[in-house]
Image (cartoon, rainbow, N blue to C red):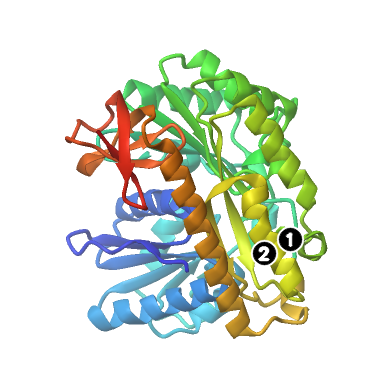
């Protein structure tokens, strides 16, 4: 289920409620800053997600609740659902303005919004949503906006890519984010160096389709080249981590970097979605079941400490019990330890929405079984760590993370950002426990 990433803070003249992915959280921080600079007051920005119909439903419910709680507060809706369904949000009486994904990154759009909110606008005039497919450059806020960090400069997320050129049959994200575009390597290096100089200990490279990085840049560098360049030119960076990857797009240089670079963390979250070849074909994915298994096996041989997570969809249209079991079996075949399970949710306008649907009760049941399988896989991973000595990066609240991103409860709290070695004494079923 997609939940708000942040609740509004009453003390701020501009509040934000952000749904969905990490990229939306980064966008929200930048939008809040621009809205504040434009002079907006008594306003809340609802940054929506379009990945599922449930996500859109939650955003609409939240908008109504926000208006009930503060009837005089202005509501500006933006994000992927606003980009793909602007008229639906503009028709809501609670909504004062609808901004597209490109517009929310433009200071002038927030300045115009402040001016427009002084007038009573009809539903059509509320909408400021351009053609996202016409956007060819990355927005400046991807690097210049506020760093999204854990307290104490522990970790910062740096968006280096936006948009997607692929057209999976279940997905509307390309229509919300546009085509793939990347931040030049020099700008990424400069931003990462700046963050490290400020005390950040771990950088996470992120994007909508991260493994497509560089296709539109001069010389078409790949993600592996960016990773090597960052590690070479920012030697003070202790940890570099990657967000979700499409395994079929992983380039040879990135494979070598994962095998050879100790500062590149051995935790990969893969966009697998299913374990049955026919379902993968109907999803219009570009990998087969064996491709996924082979990728994990080869990388584990090259980097034995690597840990894999994955996105999996339960109940995709036409999914038989046999096809579903192939997804269940994929957890063991790939050695997955952290699952993000999504019950299939049809999105209007996508090819999958027109395919023969699985009974909703069965979809829910299969999602439960997949999550249960994931919980058992996580338990195996936690149990295997007991007795090991691991390097951890301390966060706030007495927690830390291993290189494999597994949470650890420390015996005593350390200053956030501290790198230290500890022995794993046990686990509580969710996190490791340090001796």
Q: Quadrant of the C terminus?
A: top left
**Residue 423 at x, y percent in the picture:** 31, 29
Q: For the residues labelled 2 and 1, say whether their Cβ atoms are less than 8 Å apart.
A: yes
* Above or below, 312 relative to 71: above
Which residue sits at x=78%, y=78%? 355
How many tags in the picture? Answer: 2
Residue 367 drawn above or below residue 409: below
**Residue 228 located left or right of residue 35:** right
Q: Is mark 2 on a helix, strand or loop?
A: loop
Q: Please tell me in which quadrant of the rendered image residue 291 appears.
A: top right
Q: Identify the residue position indicated by label 1 in the image.
A: 168
Q: Which residue is drawn at 51% across and 23% down?
A: 189
Few, some or many C-alpha atoms within 10 Å of disc 2 (few <14, some 14-19, many ≥20)? many
List the residue tagged with mark 2.
171
Estimate how packed mark 1 is, as few (under 14), some (14 to 19) or many (20 or more) residues with alpha carbons within 10 Å.
some
* Disc 1, SS: loop
Please say if 379 is above or below 191. Answer: below
Is residue 69 something that shows in the picture?
A: yes
Q: Residue, x 69% and y 65% (percent of image)? A: 325
Q: Could you say where residue 207 lies in the image, as x and y percent from the top left?
A: 57, 44
Left or right? Give the position of 237 relative to 15: right
């Amino acid at each position: 289920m997609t939940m708000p990433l942040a609740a509004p803070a009453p003390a701020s003249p501009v509040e934000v409620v952000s749904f969905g992915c990490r990229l939306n959280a980064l966008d929200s921080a930048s939008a809040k800053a621009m809205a504040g600079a434009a002079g907006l007051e008594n306003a809340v920005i609802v940054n929506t997600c379009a990945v599922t119909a449930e996500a859109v439903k939650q955003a609409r419910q939240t908008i109504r609740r926000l208006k009930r709680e503060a009837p005089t507060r202005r509501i500006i809706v933006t994000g992927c659902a606003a980009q793909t369904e602007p008229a639906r949000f503009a028709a809501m009486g609670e909504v004062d303005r609808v901004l597209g994904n490109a517009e929310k990154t433009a200071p002038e759009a927030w300045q115009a919004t402040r001016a427009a909110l002084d007038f009573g606008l009809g539903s059509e005039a509320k909408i400021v949503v351009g053609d996202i497919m016409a956007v060819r450059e990355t927005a400046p806020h991807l690097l210049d906006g506020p760093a999204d960090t854990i307290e104490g400069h522990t970790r910062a997320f740096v968006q280096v890519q936006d948009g997607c050129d692929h057209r999976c049959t279940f997905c509307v994200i390309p229509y919300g984010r546009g085509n793939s575009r990347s931040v030049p390597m020099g700008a990424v290096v400069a931003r990462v160096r700046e963050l490290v100089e400020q005390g950040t200990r771990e950088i996470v490279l992120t994007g909508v389709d991260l493994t497509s990085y560089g296709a539109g840049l001069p010389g078409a560098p790949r993600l592996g080249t960016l990773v090597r360049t960052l590690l070479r030119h920012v030697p003070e960076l202790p940890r570099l981590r990657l967000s979700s990857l499409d395994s079929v797009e992983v380039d040879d240089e990135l494979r070598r970097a994962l095998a050879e670079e100790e500062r590149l963390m051995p935790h990969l979250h893969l966009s697998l979605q299913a374990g049955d070849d026919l379902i993968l074909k109907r999803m219009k994915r570009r990998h087969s079941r064996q491709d996924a298994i082979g990728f994990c096996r080869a990388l584990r041989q090259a980097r034995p400490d690597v840990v894999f997570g994955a996105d999996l969809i339960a109940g995709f249209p036409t999914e038989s019990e046999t096809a579903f079991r192939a997804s269940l079996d994929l957890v063991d075949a790939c050695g997955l330890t952290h699952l993000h399970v999504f019950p299939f949710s049809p999105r209007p306008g996508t090819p999958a929405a027109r395919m023969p649907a699985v009974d909703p009760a069965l979809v829910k049941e299969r999602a439960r079984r997949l999550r249960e399988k994931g919980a058992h896989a996580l338990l195996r991973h936690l149990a295997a760590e007991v007795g090991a000595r691991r390097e951890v990066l301390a966060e706030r609240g007495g927690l830390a993370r291993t290189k494999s991103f597994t949470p650890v409860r420390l015996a005593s709290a350390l200053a956030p950002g501290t790198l230290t070695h500890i022995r794993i004494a046990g686990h509580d079923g969710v996190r490791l426990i340090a001796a």
